[in-house]
Image: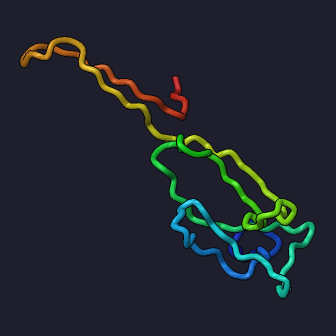
Amino acid sequence: FLQRDVPGTTADLPIVEAPEPSRLGLGNLLVFIGMDAQSQKRWTPNETYGFSAGIQVPSETPRHAVNEWIVEWGFDQPALERRAAAALAQGQEVRAVHGFQVWAIGGSIQGQSSELLFQFGLVTAVPT
């Protein structure tokens, strides 16, 4: 969150301390402790802020939840007018083999020929 650590930024992120992993046990939540009434840190117009964080790419694209990155300022405020802003970015499909299936076609007698049919899906196009 410090300018020296994030290429392309022009100012430190105006937060009280570096974010820590969620205490709620949620691996997909990164909480920045922002400003309070006594803080001297403020958002400044025309500055570029940023942060870097490690992520763990799942083995497949999420299907039971949204595949999006959501950033909210004031998410912990119950009243909407106290929530400063939000942004959303669509996540990309995880580039992995999925839906893998195998079928045996033909006899199952030992010593006889048999054929196997493989079917699977890819996110990345296969060059032809």
| The N terminus lies in quadrant | bottom right
Residue 112 lies in what quarter of the image?
top left
Q: Quadrant of residue 9?
A: bottom right
**Going by the image, does 82 lie left or right of 60?**
right
Q: Between residue 96 and residue 71, name the one nearer to us.
A: 71
Residue extending farthest to the front is: 78
Residue drawn 55% across and 30% down? 125
Please give the name of the residue rendered at 65% of the width and 48% of the height, measured from the top-left corner. Answer: 68
Q: Is residue 62 above or below residue 102?
A: below
For residue 106, what is the image quadrant? Answer: top left
Colouring: rainbow
Residue at 9% over, 16% down: 109
Which residue is located at x 48 percent, y 43 percent?
Answer: 60
The spot of residue 79 in percent (x, y) is 82, 63
Q: Position of residue 87 (x, y in %)?
A: 77, 54
Say left or right for 114 vs 21.
left
Residue 113's place in the image compared with 120, above or below, is above
Q: Which of 79 and 28 lies nearest the eye of the viewer? A: 79
Q: Is residue 110 left or right of residue 33?
A: left
Horizontal side, residue 14 vs residue 104: left or right: right
